[in-house]
Amino acid sequence: MKTKKGFTLIELMLVVIIIGVLVSMVVPRLVGRSEEARVAASKADINANISVAFDLYELDNGKYPTTEEGLRVLLTKPASAVKWKGPYLKKEPIDPWGRKYLYRSPGDHVSDYDLYSYGPDGIEGGGDDVTNWEEAKM
């Protein structure tokens, strides 16, 4: 008697069902994680990367750049710089949603400067802005 080797249709269906069940349990946990990662990257840029560059600029020049000078002083020497030792960043800082970070000096929320992104929706407010100050929760 010959024995045939291979999988039956029932065995294949069982494997497909098991894979489907596993996927249905994992996918909902991953949905939304990419947006969380973008927010975390934006917070890291604002609270560490760009802030350190501004602190180095201030250390060299005795003051933070004006609002008009903006973030570009971290890449190219402005006329007002006394001891510019930059560039302080390798490339223009762009938030994870493809927009420029916003800068205001002196700041309305922090005395030295405000550095922020309007977040995923690109609109001011709404609770999803990423800032270098603590937002009041409603």
Image: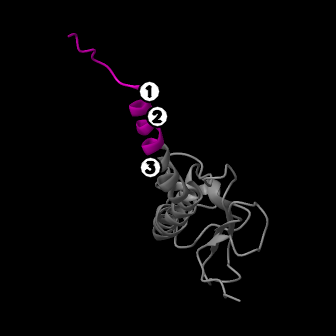
Q: Quadrant of the N terminus?
A: top left
- In the picture, measured across the screen, residue 19 lies left or right of residue 105, that is left
Residue wearing tag 1: 9
Q: Quadrant of the C terminus?
A: bottom right
Q: What crowding class fits label 2: few (fewer than 14 Cα within 10 Å), some (14-19), or many (20 or more)?
A: few
How far, Cα to Cα, is label 2 from label 3?
A: 14 Å
Whether label 1 touches label 2, CB < 8 Å: yes
Element at badge 3?
A: helix
Residue wearing tag 2: 13
User: What residue is rendered at 60% in x and 83% in y?
Assistant: 134
Give the residue furthest to the front: 1
Residue wearing tag 3: 22
11 drawn magenta: yes
How far, Cα to Cα, is label 1 from label 2?
A: 6 Å
* Nearest-to-viewer mark from 2 and 3: 2
In the displayed structure, 55 sits above or below 136; it is above
- In the picture, measured across the screen, residue 64 lies left or right of residue 125, that is left
Residue range in magenta is 1-19
Percent coordinates x, y for residue 130 in the rendering: 63, 69
Q: Quadrant of residue 46?
A: bottom right
Q: Quadrant of residue 121?
A: bottom right
In the displayed structure, 126 sits above or below 122; it is below
Q: What crowding class fits label 1: few (fewer than 14 Cα within 10 Å), some (14-19), or many (20 or more)?
A: few
